[in-house]
Image (tube, rainbow, N blue to C red):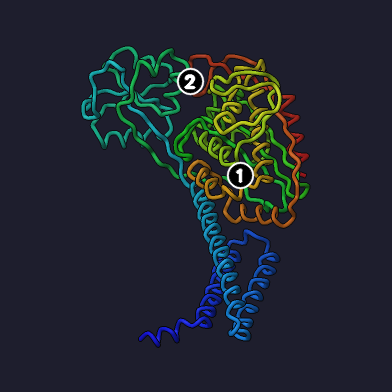
Amino acid sequence: MKDKLKKVFTLKNVSLFIKGLFLISVIVLFTILFKTKIIPTKYIIELLIILVLINLIFILVDIKFNRKKVLVIILDILSIIFIVILNFATVKLIETDSFFNKITSNNKVEISNYYVVIKKDSNYEKLRDIKNKNIKILKSESNYKEVKEKLNSKVKINFDDEEELTNLGNYLLESKDNLIIVSDANYDLLDENIENFKESTKILYKLSIESVLEDISKDKKVTKEPFNIYISGIDTYGKISTKARSDVNIIMTINPVTKKILLTSIPRDYYVQLHGTTGYKDKLTHAGVYGINMSVQTIEDLLDIDINYYLRVNFNTLIDVVDELDGIEVYSDSSFTPWTNQSCKFQKGTQKVDGKCALAFARERHAYNSGDRHRGENQQQVITALINKATTSKKVITNYSNILNALDGSFQTNLSTEEIYALINMQIDDMASWSIESNSLNGNDSSNYTYSYGSQKLYVMEPNYETVKTAQDKISEYME
């Protein structure tokens, strides 16, 4: 038996086995490369030819010089190194493909969260305690019928409709026996406009409604034609598919031919007509409460443009990605302590920031006389810094898996996987540098009634239509 094993495990046979693994590793990697087309075909073919030739040379040397054990062992070690590198690349490629397939499939549904809310001093403790009670619901609430049906399937309740959100909140505070059901976004809105609302109330029960999201993308040949992407930074730390207010509203106009990018920022409180609605206008941020498509179509109406795709991120995304890139540099034109994170201290000038301070910088508005307009400029600056860092830093390679993990679940787009790969392919092929220009819409501080909130006036920004026209012209220029 030992003699048979010795004949099998000769240096020659082991070497040939290693070369076989080398060849198999090449075949597996390049099968995936050809399938995904994430790297230009010409580079794939060139690299494939080189690796196959190396493998054949190693095999021929093994056969011809099999008695020179030192040479054979050296070639075996080199082959093992190649196998490790190839398998590492294969694993990373599979991770990448899985990640992009996941984020592009996340755009099929949207989730709306609703709370059964009671006063803090209420005697209700569990859902069963409110059986056969009356509960008020906003008639204009998204998924109005579905919410009633789903809650009724849990416990029998009598529903009363309410026309205005303000009245709904005030009704709840009138008595410890009163009940309301409200979306999480409207719950936050009540807290913003009714003093100590959240402190005086508590959530008894939470339910979620999942709805199919209509695909309204307008496909382009993304490597040959200019296109617009709507970047939405949503006001939530939860699932990216959750409907939520959009605190960041930026149109990224990309011209792949001229290698130019235009960032057009729209203030969150811009007073606009929500798409398909009549009556009061509303803050642009509130469009997100009705879903990503409402935000897209409302901005299309405002700027008279086609938005081809959207990219939605939540606050977790920025924190984690900036940290994985080992921070970014931003320029502050004044010294201040941000209201959202007082542990961050900004001095006038350029400084390096981590994820939490990058987020605080992007959200700051109270430190500036121009408020939300200045915040839009900071947001553009953070995006530009991220693009520059991601295209120049070695951290993208060394922290690659961590960056993907950071983006997982907090990043959503209706770009297809093929379109994303085409853009990556183009960038690898020409390694072009991009010029980035920024522009902002402007307006005047005002107070007015809103579609979402009803009879109580809220702070809004009345559009300066000269800046709207300027934005339209600039976008048209980049789209040519």
**Mark 2 to mark 1 CA distance (whole Å):** 29 Å
The residue depicted at 56 percent of the width and 47 percent of the height is 399
- Locate residue 369, reporting x and y percent: 66, 15
Bin the neighbour count of mark 2 within 10 Å (Cα to Cα): few under 14, some 14-19, many 20 and up.
Answer: many
Q: 340 or 476, which is in the foreground?
A: 340
Identified by mark 1, the residue type is Tyr
Indicate which disc, 2 or 1, sits on the residue closer to the N terminus: 1
> Looking at the picture, how far across and down is residue 436, in whole percent?
74, 38
The residue located at (68%, 37%) in the rendering is 384
Q: Is residue 338 left or right of residue 261?
A: left
Q: Which residue is mark 2?
A: 453
Pointer 1 local density, CA inside 10 Å: few below 14, some 14–19, many at least 20: many
Q: Nearer the viewer, residue 116 or 67?
A: 67
Residue 312 appears in view? no
Residue 394 is left or right of residue 414, and the answer is right
Q: Quadrant of the N terminus?
A: bottom left
Specify the amino acid type for callout 2.
Tyr
Q: Secondary structure at mark 2?
A: loop
Task: For mark 1, give the secondary structure.
Answer: strand
- Report the residue at 58% width, 21% height from top: 338
Q: Classify residue 195 by image quadrant.
A: top left
Left or right relative to 474: residue 463 = left
The circle on residue 266 is none
Q: Position of residue 412 (x, y in %)?
A: 53, 43
Residue 379 falls in image quadrant: top right
The numbered mark at residue 309 is 1
